[in-house]
Image (cartoon, grey):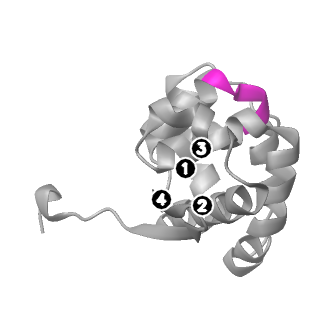
Amino acid sequence: MSLKDFVIHKEQVSFRGGVLEVRGLALNDVTVIARDHLAELDRLFNLYDSDVTRNAAMSESAAFAVKLIQESPQLVATMIALACDDPASVDKAQCLPLPVQVETVRKIIELTFEEAGGAKKFFDSLVELVSGVMPLRLTP
């Protein structure tokens, strides 16, 4: 299999106004988020920086999505726009109904962490990569 054969897995989020198709976050997406929302990203790392199992992390994704929306609505809108491959639509993503935002963020989190083999593995890899490239200070 070559890179040209790779298909990015996407899932749909249905709502009364239509359907959104989202994918997991890639390094480019996380770079944009880190550049514009470092404090919120740091909180995200702290929330998932534990030795919980993959299943526990996934079961917490809906609760985490609600907390993230409450604390960082701009970060959430950015995540949604990036995961929809439409980074120019952050303003529109902010206007999605709350239940749609929660379900969309939940799917993005699951897709991102599933591909990496779990939340802890994702964050370990990301912290290692980012610390070598960017001068980020992430809370231990």
Q: Nearer the viewer, residue 93 or 10?
A: 93
**Is disc 3 placed on a helix, strand or loop?**
helix
In magenta segment, residue 37? yes
- The range drawn in magenta is 36-41
**Residue type, numbered disc 2:** Lys
First reached walking from the N terminus: tag 1 or tag 4: 4
Extreme-front residue of the structure: 17
Q: Does 115 sit above or below residue 95? A: below
**Is disc 2 placed on a helix, strand or loop?**
helix
Q: Quadrant of residue 77?
A: top right
Q: Which one is closest to the eye, mark 3 or mark 2?
A: 3
The residue wearing badge 2 is 121
**Is disc 1 placed on a helix, strand or loop?**
helix
Q: Which one is closest to the eye, mark 1 or mark 4?
A: 4
Q: Indicate left or right for 33 with 133 as reference.
A: right
Asked whether the beta carbons under mark 1 and mark 2 sit within 8 Å of each other, the answer is yes
Extreme-top residue of the structure: 135
Distance from disc 3 to disc 1, alpha carbons, whole Å, reads 19 Å
The residue wearing badge 1 is 125
Q: Magenta residues: mostly which secondary structure?
A: helix
Distance from disc 1 to disc 4, alpha carbons, whole Å, reads 22 Å
Distance from disc 2 to disc 4, alpha carbons, whole Å, reads 21 Å
Q: Does 35 sit above or below residue 124? A: above
Distance from disc 1 to disc 2, alpha carbons, whole Å, reads 6 Å
Q: Nearer the viewer, residue 37 or 13?
A: 13
Residue located 77% across and 35% down the image: 40
The residue wearing badge 4 is 22
Distance from disc 3 to disc 2, alpha carbons, whole Å, reads 20 Å
Q: Dot 2, crowdedness within 10 Å: few (<14), some or many (≥20)?
A: some
